[in-house]
Amino acid sequence: MRPHSKIAALLSALFMGLGQLYNRQYIKGVLLIFIGAFFIIGYAADFVYAMNGLITLGSEVDKIEGFEIIKGDNSIHLLIQGLIFLIAFILILISHITNVIDAYTVGKRREMGKNPNNIKETLISIYEKGFPFMLLLPSLFATAFLIILPNLFGILLAFTNYSSPNHLPSNNLVDWVGFDTFINLFKMESWSHTFFGVFGWTIVWSIFSTFTCFFGGLFVALLVNKKGIKFKRFWRSVFILPWAIPQFVSILIMQNLFNGEFGPINQFLLQIGVIDNNINWLSDPLLAKITIIVVNIWFGFPYWMVLMSGVMTSIDAELFEAAEVDGANKKQMFRKITLPIVLFSTAPLLIMNFAGNFNNFNMIYLMTQGKPVNPDYQGAGSTDILISWIYKMTLEQRQYNMAAVVSILIFLVIATISIWNFRRTKAFKEEDMMS
Amino acid sequence: MIKNKTISGKITLVLCYILLTIITLSVLYPLLWVIMGSFNPGDSLFKPSLIPCEWVQKEAPSQVALDKNSSSENETSQQETKKKLDCKMTTAHYKYLFTETDYAKWYWNTFKIAFGNMVLSTFFIVTAGYVFSRYRFKGRKYSLMTMLVLQMFPSFMGMIAIYLLLDRIGLLDTHIGLVLVYAGGAIPFGAWLVKGYFDGIPRSLEEAARIDGAGHMTVFFKVMMPLSRPILVFVAVNNFISPWMDFIFARFVLTSTEKKTLAIGLFDMVTGKSSTQFTNFAAGAVLVAIPITILFVIFQKHIVEGLKAGANKG
């Protein structure tokens, strides 16, 4: 008997659809050949050009010859085009492999003496077996082009010299520079000083903002859930308001409340005579940092309060009864029962919250825009955290490559924290999860 | 001994109430301030008084003037014969928003984007989550890992690429483009969340349905969807609310003024060059905050549960 499966697979590997023809699945084969031919005739030349562009990032800038402008290469357009083609190529490659596998399995069926499916059967089987893929296809495309492609592009930028003032297309070309930008970030005084300064404050900010809100929430949850306190629902619904109100609105309100010149807080303090001069809540470097952390409690505590209230009310009452029988007092019960349970069940969230605060762009940018200006820093203000610094580097200073480098560093920090956190959680240990 | 305990208990209770009141005041103060500010005449919110009312000396309190005031003030005016509470509440800022600015348009834009994002994201997330939970196929593990890693990239990393990409396909400065960006970004977190939820639903129901001859579609729509209502609501509400808050991508993708969303419009009101529009901003902020807050409070339970699930499942 002829090895149908291998011949069909080989033919399909040679050109999409040939193996299917060999398997006497004519309609399917012709359709596949058309698809294959469409991509090869239509895009092969473009693909080579795009790959070349991705590697060289262009060689000619715009030139003026006589009265004509000869369009040169735009490195950044070449870069993104190269990536689009690369991802499209991978997707096509996957379908090509599927086509080879299909030819192989149909060949195997023939070897076993069964007839290959006709087109109707094929369609039914595609629907039956391919249903999950069809369901996944939209999100696969969206993820590939809207998340993977942009992030890949971002990573690649870190290895170029795409930055103002000397390497901005289309007047200049951009080149691959390897790890030079990384080295500059750590070696060049102006960059490294800014980076470590901003990084330090980012860590301080993340720690303080996470813990103040966490314990603030715990404190309020304890207050509200205390025995004998009435109108629990009322207190809870008032305290949830800061979480419910669109954050950008309330941050902008806060920014105005703490305005150093005519903000109502200063006005009020002046009126009752506590202070004689306006306090520069947001324009003094140190005070601005403190103000942001304190104001952030307003935004952050409701989340924890709600979560912890939930945990506290779900603690088995028998535990407390047993403790009471054993002669434990309130303090002991709190320290030995309530606190451990609350901490245990909120710990993973605490870590994710830390990661969230690390990248809490809205709070910093809408509150201060990173101000006050710090003359020692390269393009960052005193209250800028890494993410808002990146934003400024991208939109204001066009230091795209440096922004990409810092983004990668942020990614490394967040990834480390998240993976560590994830490995601890039950989900990861569940057998079915990752198998 | 027992008496002592009750007294100290009472003192702590009183202390608790005092603390609760203080917290309530500090929570409500910024909100009251902005609400009052939106009714405040003039363009500056920076007035010493929270309430835009002041006592003015009146030479001869006349009945005509009293009638002009609203009924709530009548009582006070009657008590004070010489002084009168003069309230300068005005709805001028609300009128201004709708007549002088594109506020209504921004509102409509944001609503369109939010609605579009809700539909598209939920579709992406639920289909992906379902496949990852219920089917086993090659590359599943790697896809899940990739989804996890993708969540950790800072959102700005891809900004330039997204700009160029949208420019290339002609969707820059369009609402569809922005919806695509939001919906794409929502997939990794959402798919993991929904997958985790689906994993918790026993398979026996689907298997029973399959034995009864139900196809893929029937199982998906008639069995899974009704069982996963809570998480569907969470995903939908979450993705409806998020465009109202986003400022970064909206600013980046939408360049022309008439396509602005509320977040950008309001931000420009208080931080732009014409940043003397505090009272107008306040009115605008109140109008955004009210519906979103109501929405949040209605779905509060779902949101809390969803966030908890998200953290536990990755």
Image (tube, rainbow, N blue to C red):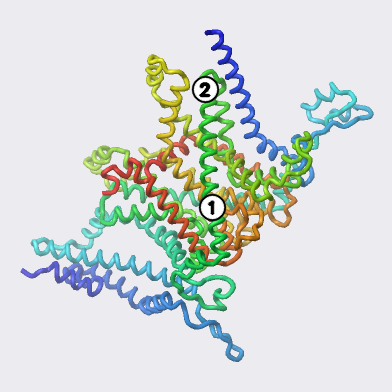
Q: Which residue of the protein is positioned furthest toward the left in this rendering?
A: A1
Q: Which mark is residue A200?
A: 1
- Determine if marks 1 and 2 fall on one subunit: yes
- Locate residue B75, reporting x and y percent: 80, 23
Q: Secondary structure at mark 2?
A: loop
Front position among marks 1 and 2: 1
The chain ID associated with circle 1 is: A
In this rendering, position of residue B24 left or right of residue B93: left
Q: Position of residue B301 (x, y in %)?
A: 47, 34
Do labels 1 and 2 touch, CB within 8 Å? no
Give residue A320's position: percent from left, percent from top: 41, 20
Position of B130 with respect to A292 (left or right) is: left
Disc 2 residue type? Answer: Lys
Residue shown at 73%/48% (left/top)?
B96
Say what amino acid the circle numbered 1 marks: Gly
Q: Which residue is mark 2?
A: A226
The front one of A230 and B217 is: A230
Give how far apart the Cα atoms at labels 1 and 2 are: 39 Å
**Quadrant position of residue A319:** top left
In the rendered view, tell whether residue A259 sits above or below residue B253.
above
Residue pictured at 43% horizontal, 34% vertical:
A343
Q: Earlier in the sequence, mark 1 or mark 2?
A: 1
| Residue drawn at point x = 24 percent, y = 56 percent | A124
Give the vertical position of A326 relative to B25 (above or below).
above
